[in-house]
Image (tube, helix red, strand yellow):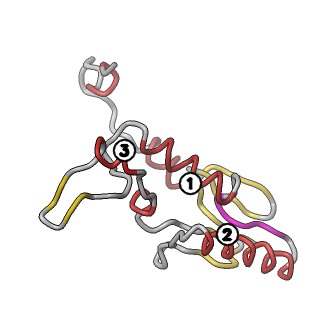
Amino acid sequence: MFSILDEKDGYWQIRQDDPSSKLCTFNTPWGRFLTLPFGIKSASEVFQQKNCETFGDIPGVYSVAEQEHDEILQNVMERAKTAQVKFNREKIQFKVDTVKYMGHVITAAGQTADETKIKAIVHMPTPEDNQVPGAVHRQ
């Protein structure tokens, strides 16, 4: 049994300290934007660090027994409340048997590759010239 939690506007839930907010933000007619902006290079690292401090390395909850699952989920929700983390209701999956996560399909029996990802590669059009896509040339 799995439950997957997705943070709502994750970066915007992380408040910057005063010195950082003066360097990493922009002013509006209503004041300074005080939460972590999407455009700075270290934003993903800061976001990941805050998540690890709050939840450890749990992207969701997994257990075999329903009672154990409920206890773990309750603990995660209490941590989220303490850290003032909000979740995206549209993306939360509670007590499901199968989840898709980072290109894999995960069940109680194990994990397999996501068929939609495999089909996308198999059905990729054959190149018509010998040009390498632009993204490969970036450094």
Q: Quadrant of the N terminus?
A: bottom right
Residue named by callout 2: 79
Q: Distance between the residues labelled 2 and 3?
A: 27 Å
11 to 24, vertically: above or below: below
Estimate the x, y position of residue 132 in percent, counting from the top left. 29, 20
Residue 37 part of the magenta segment: no
Q: What element carries label 2?
A: helix
Quarter of the image where one finds residue 32: bottom left
Q: Which amino acid does label 2 sit on?
A: Arg
Q: Image check: 10 left or right of 127?
A: right
Image point 46% across, 77% down: which residue? 90
Residue 61 part of the magenta segment: yes
Residue named by callout 1: 115
94 to 118, vertically: above or below: below
Q: Give the range drawn in magenta.
A: 59-63
Q: In which quarter of the image is the C terminus?
A: top left
117 to 15, vertically: above or below: above
36 to 78, vertically: above or below: above
Image point 30% across, 19% down: which residue? 137
Estimate the x, y position of residue 76 in percent, counting from the top left. 70, 70
Estimate the x, y position of residue 85 in percent, counting from the top left. 54, 69
Q: How far apart are marks 2 and 1 (CA)?
A: 35 Å
Residue 8's mark? Answer: none
Residue named by callout 3: 19
Q: What element carries label 1?
A: helix
Front: mark 2 or 3: 3
First in sequence: mark 2 vs mark 3: 3
